Amino acid sequence: MSDRINNIKKDFLLKNLKNSIHVKLLDKVSKSPIFISKKTGLVYHPDILSSKKAVERWSKQIFKKKNNPKKENYTSDFPGMQARHYFIIDYVRRVINLNKKTSICDFACGEGSLLIKLREYFDLANLYGTEHSIKNIKTIKKTFTKKRYKSPKLFSYSIEDFQNKNKNLKFDVGIICWTLCNCSEPLSVVEALSKSVKKNGYLVVTESSRLLVPFKKIIGNYFNKSSRAGHYHPWHWSFNSLSNIFKIYGFELINSNRYWDEDNLLLIFKNTGKINLNKINFDNHKKILEFLLRWYKESKQYKFK
């Protein structure tokens, strides 16, 4: 294994702690300590839960019918998230030829907001979804029934368990939205995705773009001062740190949006199965540190809420 791949994997096993910087000044805005890997530039919280506990926390505690991330509850049924989901599909259809035969799976599909838009606004019906929460799966089925659409085929598994139990089921297009930042073991998830997307099929990945871009909110509203964000949001992605975890499992990046202008970071990969070490790019940890400290300083004129 190359040193580059090895250092990426060590980050997510928390084996690079001694080669990371603890940004102690940011303890004022984050209950979970914030570290930067000197090896790769990854920004992370080391106080993470196990994968099983994390997915149960999202299923049973965080998903609520009122959006308030500071109080650890969340729903996709609010305008900001609804707009994001429409943006994803509209962007992807301009890059990938989607038709009624295209099999599309939304991994960790939550309450099904993206799935219903695929059906209702883009007339795509060969749909699948994985979701750990039984409650969310019932919500999706109810939504499709209410609109008189055939429900997608839904699987009540984590992404890793889905792949283990459905080894022969592979999709033309996989989508994973605002999920990997919450996963305790994102590399296990990406490895499972590489086996669930067809050879030369596509994987669409979205997260929020916050690092090494113009500030879009004050730092006190990004990190969480009252709750341990490491328990449900351990990773903070840059363009490079997010891209790298797919590249080491044979995904080739073929398209990305203008994430520096927008709130969303959208990446489209092709599952080639080939690893090109020359395309793995690390962030300079000193630039990441400088960015975070400048963000903190420029946010001080506002109240940290």
Image (cartoon, grey):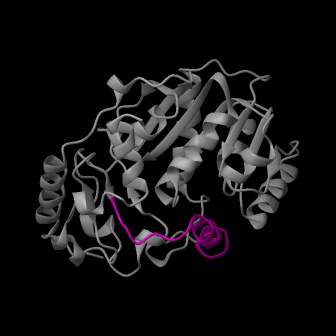
Q: Is residue 22 above or below residue 146?
A: below
Residue 16 image point, x, y percent: 31, 57
Of 259 and 105, the residue lying toward us: 105
- Quarter where residue 295 is shown: bottom left
Q: Is residue 97 left or right of residue 151?
A: left
Q: Quadrant of the C terminus?
A: bottom left
Q: Position of residue 61 (x, y in %)?
A: 62, 76
Disc tally is 0
Is 100 colored magenta in this rendering? Answer: no
Q: Residue furthest bottom?
A: 226
Q: Is residue 68 left or right of residue 59?
A: left
- Tell me where residue 275 appears, x and y as whole percent: 46, 25
The quadrant of the picture occupied by the N terminus is top left
**Which residue corresponds to the image point at 13% horizontal and 61% vertical from the top-left?**
293
Q: Is residue 37 visible?
A: yes
Give yes or no for residue 59 being in the magenta stretch.
yes
Which range is magenta? Answer: 44-65
Quarter location, residue 75 = bottom right
**Residue furthest out toward the front:** 1
Of 85 and 36, which appears nearest the observer? 36
Left or right, 265 with reference to 86:
left
Camera sees residue 85 = no
Residue at the (16%, 55%) spot, across then down: 289
- Seen from the viewer's position, the closer of residues 97 and 293 is 293
Q: Residue at x 24, y 41 (%)?
A: 283
Q: What residue is drawn where x is 46% and y is 55%? A: 181
In terms of depth relative to the viewer, which is nearer, 286 or 60?
A: 286
Could you say where residue 64 lies in the image, as x and y percent from the top left?
63, 72
